[in-house]
Amino acid sequence: MAPGVIYLDHHATTPCDGAVVEAMAPWWSEQFANPASRSHRPGLLAAAAVEQARNQIAAALGVQAEAVVFTSGATEANNLAIKGIAEAELRSGGQRRRLVCLATEHRAVLDPLRYLGGLGFELVTLQPQADGLVDLERLDAVLDEGTLLLSVMAANNEIGVLQPLAAIAQLCRQRGIRFHCDGAQAVGHIPLQPASQGLDLLSISGHKLYGPKGIGALVVDPAITLLPQLHGGSQERGLRAGTLPVPLIVGFAKAVELAMADQMERAERLGALRDALWGQCEQIGAVERNGAASPRLPHNLNITVKGVEGTALHRELRRHLAVSSGSACSSGEPSHVLQALGRSRQEAAASIRFGLGRGTSAADIHRASEILSRCVAELRAA
């Protein structure tokens, strides 16, 4: 991190916890064997480490171990879930062709769905309410017997709103529709139990919860058939070919363990800091919060600053604060999430996403609010 810069972009990524780094250490060079090499002891030890990690993650999510399929991250998990279920439907001769999502989904969900739309599937993209939450009546109206899959993220990566997953799942069950959820921003931060909440497919990512980059998982209900998207091996029950990265998997499991251990305390502390930050933002004047105040991730705040130009605002802030105007995958374009909520491109560009984290202190929040207030005052005066 650059000296003097306060990091408040924990939705983009989180620092790898020291205990996670320590847990991974032996598996890089001491216990380096391929877990698929079952003919010798080092390979068996690596395989055992993978299965122990799988069991740890499964237990934390309240599912059976075989439901956890390791991937390179949530993006790959989303692709496996969405394209895998669509291709399985085609191969089986099924007739369901409608796919439904919210307009505020991550690109890792929207792009695979649009890809399938180009292959003959019907894609219905539902606009959320102005607060970012799904309108259950409108959702109910677009779901029909021809709908194969609904994909709605648990916690939005930009505005942090929490969708009513159990109510959505109930609508899906009534019609035999599969429910996929991108849980990358939720797991480890809020309670999430896919089986009890009615989720058929859940995508998760290690680096969003203080684990390593390059590892994630798809949690798959045993009743669902998917077709693999990577071919070339029988790893992960034939759903994901490729040598398993043992260090990353071990680190992922450790990160999940740590996140579950301090989840409630962290949520309470960061929620209080986030509310304090919002109070300071309100004092600046002409600042609006994006997304529902509740239910919302405790460590998320997204605001639009009126009366300033977005590029100039972020140019001034970046010298002191690590914040963003939207998803790290947006290539600099104004947020499609904020535009779906009714913000103009100019307003979306003049928006700030604050993502607090484990290391965020009250002093950081006080300093951040001072920096923001000064920058906004200078830009408005100019």
Image (cartoon, rainbow, N blue to C red):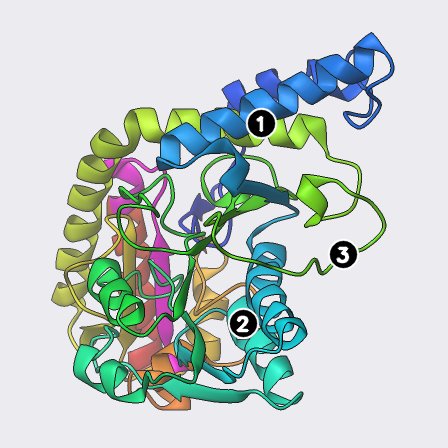
Q: Residues within 10 Å of mark 3 (few under 14, many from 20)?
A: few
Question: For the residues carrying marks 3 and 1, which lies nearer the camera in this image?
Answer: 3
- Element carrying mark 3: loop
Q: What's the amino acid at mark 1? A: Gly
Does residue 63 sit above or below 94 in this rendering? above
Residue 359 seen from this side: no
Image coordinates for residue 275, horizontal then vertical, percent: 15, 51
Frontmost residue, 59 versus 104: 59
Q: CA distance from mark 1 to mark 2?
A: 26 Å
Residue identified by numbered label 1: 251
Frontmost residue, 371 versus 158: 158
The reply to whether the C-beta atoms of the residues labelled 3 and 2 are less than 8 Å apart is: no
Q: Is residue 43 left or right of residue 254?
A: right
Q: Residues within 10 Å of mark 1 (few under 14, many from 20)?
A: many
Q: CA distance from mark 3 to mark 1?
A: 23 Å
Residue 115 seen from this side: yes
Span of residues in magenta: 348-365
Q: Residue at x 23, y 72 (%)?
A: 133
Q: Quadrant of the N terminus?
A: top right
Give the mark nearer the N terminus: 3 vs 2.
2
Give the mark nearer the N terminus: 3 vs 1.
3
Residue identified by numbered label 2: 107
Checking the image for residue 209, the label placed there is none
Q: Residue at x 80, y 17 (%)?
A: 43
Q: Is residue 349 magenta?
A: yes
Q: Residue furthest front?
A: 93
Image coordinates for residue 104, horizontal then vertical, percent: 39, 76
Checking the image for residue 230, the label placed there is 3
Q: What's the amino acid at mark 2? A: Arg
Q: What's the amino acid at mark 3? A: Leu
- Element carrying mark 2: helix
- Element carrying mark 1: helix
